[in-house]
Structures are given as structure tokens and as C-alpha cells.
Amino acid sequence: MGIESTNLAGRVCLVTGANSGIGKSTAHALARLNATVVMVCRDRNRAEPVRDEIATATGNQNVELMMCDLSSQADIRRFAADFLNTHNRLDVLINNAGVVVRQRSLTEDGIESTFAVNHLGYFLLTNLLLDLLKKSAPARIVNVSSAAHAYGKIDFDNLQGERKYGGFSAYANSKLANVLFTYELARRLDGPGVTANCLHPGGVATGLFRNLPKPIEALIKLVTISPNKGAETSVYLASSPAVEGVTGKYFARKRETRTSNASYNEEAARRLWEVSSELSGLERR
């Protein structure tokens, strides 16, 4: 990926959704850079062979597997507690896991599934691990968003698709929420100790869009890039000295890029933070 000279030995990097697609490629690349990699996955049977594959291919035995269902706030809290009990540092948090849900559904917490996993999962996990990130500073938070955020809208009267729902619209809205969250988090951190950036990985050939109609899924595959290529910007933001201290930015193809006009609405970002705090049961920070 062009950054093989970066050595992450001694650094702990956590990657959600790490058993397939961009997450798997990201975990593999970080392991190759000698980081201690914590793969956060939902399905142990699917994830264990991937963990073994990465450890064998890279020769890095510091590849760990921890389980978490990011659609469940209780499980996110359980995982965070387990992680804090077993790790004394966290240098890089990569919020990567995501879903596209064609038909509206609710999680066990009564939250619309796309919003729950793609946004609240990022929000809650990051906040629960934030104190450890601060203790490990300089540390980095990397949020995987998408160029689809430009089609998103944060409508607080229809935040979870209560009035009108579309699978792609819900996905685009959640990716806009990722950008707003990143920018607001960077403002609240207010310093170089812990940085927060987000990114567009490119149109990547993963299983993310497997629930879409088959003709659309086939079309997407024709114009997508490989997961390895898609992981490059995540790995760059997690490891490159070139972005040390850079925060509150959005990257595509490893370059800082402007986001949609809606993403710079600070009032909307603050309100989204407050609503997210309430929905996830977090005290306001």
C-alpha cells in the first residue's frame, strides 16, 4: 500500500468489521506493519479463520479477535468493558463496520438498523474508549464514511426513517452522520493528542450491498475496486506520519477532500451529538 516503511510495533489498533471486505484488508495491512491488531467481529466461526490467515500471512502473532454485535448497545458496552479490562492502551480506533438494509428494521434497542450500526455504533464505541485513547496519546480515530454522504440528509423529524424509508437513503444519511460526528468529535477533542478523521474508501467490491436487488448489485461490482485498494486510505490515516496531528478532515485516495455543504453545519452536528447521546444512554461530554 505504499506505506510499508511505517512501523507500528507496540501500537494497538482496533478495527471493527474486520473479518471481511475493507476491514479484513485493513487488519491485514496493519498486522504487516507490526501493529497489535484487535479484530472486532460479530461471527466467531467466520472470524477465527480470518484471524489465523492474517497472522500466518504476515508472521505477526499479535492479531487478536474480540466479539461484538455493533447493533446492540448492551454488547458494545460489554465489549468496551472487556477491552478496557484486557488492554492498557489504544493507539488507533478504526470504525469500519457497516450495513445496508433494504427494508426498514429495528434493533433490540428499538433503533433503525442502519442508523444503529453505521452511526450509533461508531458514536457509542468511540465515546466508551475515548479516555483510553487520550491516555495513549498521540492516538487516532478513523471513521469510514462514504462519498454517498453527499446524498444524505439529517432530518431530525425522520432521523430513523420513521416517516419515509429507503435503503440507499438510510445508508447515505448514516454516512453523512459519520462525517458530522467526526467533525464534531474533532472540535470537542480540541487538540493534537487524539485526532479524528473520516474517509471515503472508494467504490469497493464487498458484501455490503448484497441485500440490494441483483441487477443493481451486479452493476456495482462492475465499477468497484478491490478491498485492498479500498483499505489504503484507512491504513494511511491510521499509520502515516504525514497526517500526524491532522484532525477534523475527510480524505479520499489518501488526500484531504471537501465534503458536502450539509456536513459543515455545526448546529446540526451538535444536535446530532445530543440526540445520539440520548439514544445511546451516554452522559453529555
Image (cartoon, rainbow, N blue to C red):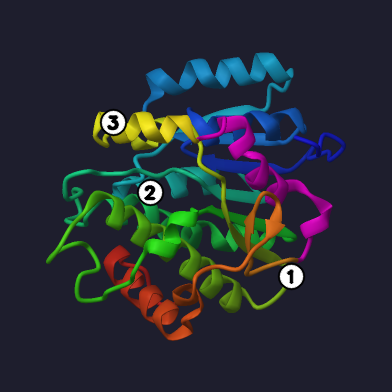
Mark 3 vs 1, N-terminal side: 1
Where in the figure is residue 187, as x and y percent of width and height?
Answer: 59, 78
Which is closer to the viewer, label 3 or label 1? 3
| Segment colored magenta | 224-245
Can you identify the residue that label 2 sits on? 76
Residue most extreme to the right = 5
Mark 3 vs 2, N-terminal side: 2
Magenta residue check for 173: no
Tell me the distance, in whole angstroms, between the alpha carbons under discs 1 and 2: 27 Å
Where in the figure is residue 54, as x and y percent of width and height?
Answer: 62, 20
The residue shown at (33%, 45%) is 75
Residue most extreme to the left = 163
Is disc 1 surrounded by few (<14), some (14 to 19) or many (20+) residues within 10 Å?
Answer: some
What amino acid type is highlighted by mark number 2?
Ile
Can you identify the residue that label 3 sits on? 215
Is disc 3 surrounded by few (<14), some (14 to 19) or many (20+) residues within 10 Å?
Answer: few
Q: Which mark is residue 266?
A: none
The residue shown at (37%, 27%) is 43
Tell me the distance, in whole angstroms, between the alpha carbons under discs 3 and 2: 35 Å
Can you identify the residue that label 1 sits on? 192
Tell me the distance, in whole angstroms, between the alpha carbons under discs 3 and 1: 46 Å
Q: Secondary structure at mark 1?
A: loop
Q: Secondary structure at mark 2?
A: helix
Magenta residue check for 240: yes
Location of the N terminus by quadrant is top right
- 138 left or right of 147? right
On the question of residue 193 being in view, the answer is yes
- 26 left or right of 210? right
What amino acid type is highlighted by mark number 1?
Pro
Where in the figure is residue 251, as x and y percent of width and height?
Answer: 64, 57
Mark 1 vs 2, N-terminal side: 2
Q: Which of the pair 81/152 is nearer the observer? A: 152
